[in-house]
Image: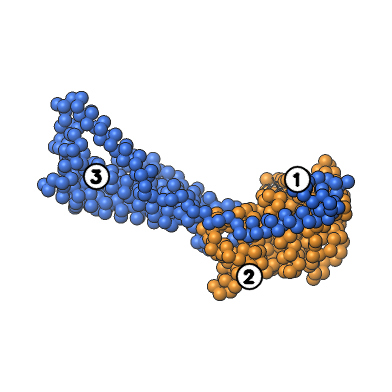
Amino acid sequence: MAMTDSAPATTSTLLDFQNVQLTYPNGTIALSGVDLTVRRGEFVTVVGPSGCGKSTLLRIASGLEVSSEGISTVNTKRVGYVFQDATLLPWRNVRANVELLAELQWDTQAVRREKAQKAIDLVGLTGFEKHLPRQLSGGMRMRTSLARSLTLDPELFLFDEPFGALDEITREYLNDELLKLFVEQQFAGLFITHSVSEAVYLSTKVMVMSGRPGRIVDTFDVPFPMPRDPDIRYTGEFAALVGEVSHALREGHGA
Amino acid sequence: MSIERVTDEGMDTAEAIDDLTGDERQALEHRETVQEIAPATAAAVPLKRRRSRGGGIANWGPPIAVAILIVGLWYLVGLIDPSKSFLLPPPHEVFAVYLDPKIAPDIYEALWNTAVVALTGLAIAIVVGIVWAVAMNQAKWVERSLYPYAVILQTIPILALVPLIGFWFGFDFTARVIVAVLIGLFPMVSNTLFGLQSVDASQRELFKLQQASPWIMLKKLQFPAALPAIFAGMRISAGLALVGAIVGDFFFQRGTPGIGALISKYQSRLNAEPLFASIILASLFGVVVFWFFGWLGKRVVGKWYDFA
Ligand SMILES: Nc1ncnc2c1ncn2[C@@H]1O[C@H](COP(=O)(O)OP(=O)(O)OP(=O)(O)O)[C@@H](O)[C@H]1O
Ligand SMILES: [Mg+2]
């Protein structure tokens, strides 16, 4: 059952989808009747099987795609978007890659430098400014990508399975880093993932999607306080919630 | 139950700490993992050195060995029928030409003239090819309208066209350059277009999200991404432009004729030694130009791209 979030859109609502549907030109119905709200202070995670329309959701939120039906509202101009792969420009070093978005906004050189250095420090890449992407590990490339989006000082941060290609240990480490940024930088997050435990660990709210056509089948509030203790992952409540979400995922998949 | 599952997973690294309760052990172990990882991730991969470039017997040895082999075979073939040595003079007689004060200066001057034609043609082919490809990259309909003509450049029987070029543009420098351009153009067009279109969709979207104009996208994304393909194209075009210049020499002998004209003169007089000397020199010049663009490509994009 799709749960309708009936709270009225207020100024604290950064992203609001009402009954959003998207049909691609070839007739694929990627999304159908999606209701979704992301407010200030929220970190919403969407889990769902491959091909169920998760990326499409973000593409609409970012404006790369326009919904065929329904209303999608974004109440901020500062939107960060982190792609599944790091999408770094291989000929630019870390600093130049991080400066890119500010450069495209026609910031002056001094402002660009300052923004980039701040973001590089935030993601813990200080000292690697001169490295080229090919000289970095996968995790560091992802951090560079994260830093690049941070230069926009986003109010709404969209993540499309950013850590999906990383090994478990690096992923957990970056999850902690991301949560720290979430608490410090005060952006609202909409995060896509395949991993249920990642979803529960990171977010204030987990939404479960099912495919063909893509829709939200269940929503779970995550009660654990922020900033989150990494060890929470090893508690019974955490495991129980992971179990519930996994269950919903499996049911949605079977449907 | 789920705690047990989690504990089991961590078992192999947690063996040393068994006098703690399950939860404590997990907590401790996890903290250790993170601490271990943190410096490892931050200290990161050391700056990887690229393969040592150039120099060394490993690089020069094999081609030199092949050269020796070829010269050896050349002598052998000459031994089969010594009466035909006017068709295939022995190598030392050919190489002696390069030092012969009566012939050598002619050959060098002719090569220089051809080189000027070839490099002028190459420069034009590079500029026209890149502009052509960029234009095609701007819109699908432009590509559809212009690409067939790029292919025609490649398939047209150029030798049939060359005499006409002479009638239209005269029989000296201009006509020879035009032939060089016609023959050298296609690889520049196709390689540049391929390079421009090799950009990932998500990288384009990254720019689109910032409302980057097509010009900015070209300048900061597509053109840099295309550079390796462009340099590869230049290398191919350079060789072809040289062929074009020599072909032009054969047909257009007005003005300052190049090495092609000399070759056809030696051919008609069955002057085998200078004929071979000229052909070999022209080929070596092609190798040098090819090598130069490889070197230039490495200089420009080698830092981030393994330019072969
Ligand atoms: N441009 C497009 N044209 C047509 N169909 C598309 C297009 N993009 C995506 N689709 C289809 O829409 C559906 C949803 O795609 P989407 O990329 O949103 O899935 P996803 O949940 O992000 O998948 P994954 O987990 O594999 O990334 C898929 O069936 C996909 O094949
Ligand atoms: Mg996706």
Q: Secondary structure at mark 1?
A: helix
Q: Which mark is residue B12?
A: 1
Which quarter of the figure has residue B82? Answer: top left
Q: Identify the amino acid type marked 1.
A: Asp
Question: Residue B250: horizontal and vertical position, in percent?
Answer: 23, 43
Q: Identify the amino acid type marked 3.
A: Leu
Structural distance between the alpha carbons of marks 3 and 1:
69 Å
Residue lying at 35% horizontally and 39% vertically, measured from the top left: B62
Q: Which chain is orange?
A: A
The residue labelled by disc 3 is B281
**Around disc 3, counting alpha carbons within 10 Å, would you say few (fewer than 14), some (14 to 19), or many (20 or more)?**
some
Structural distance between the alpha carbons of marks 2 and 3:
59 Å
Of A237 and B189, nearer the camera is A237
Question: Residue A205: horizontal and vertical position, in percent?
Answer: 82, 58
Seen as rendered, the residue at the extreme top is: B80
The residue labelled by disc 2 is A118
Which of the chains bears the disc numbered 2?
Answer: A
Question: Residue B85: horizontal and vertical position, in percent?
Answer: 16, 30
Q: Identify the amino acid type marked 2.
A: Lys
Q: Which chain is blue?
A: B
Question: Residue B108: horizontal and vertical position, in percent?
Answer: 20, 50
Observer able to see residue B184: no
Residue lying at 84% horizontally and 51% vertically, measured from the top left: B19
Which of the chains bears the disc numbered 3?
Answer: B
- Horizontal arrangement in the rendering, residue B76 relative to residue B26 (left or right): left
**Which sits earlier in the primary sequence, circle 3 or circle 1?**
1
Of B82 and B121, nearer the camera is B82
Q: Secondary structure at mark 2?
A: helix
Residue lying at 67% horizontally and 69% vertically, measured from the top left: A153
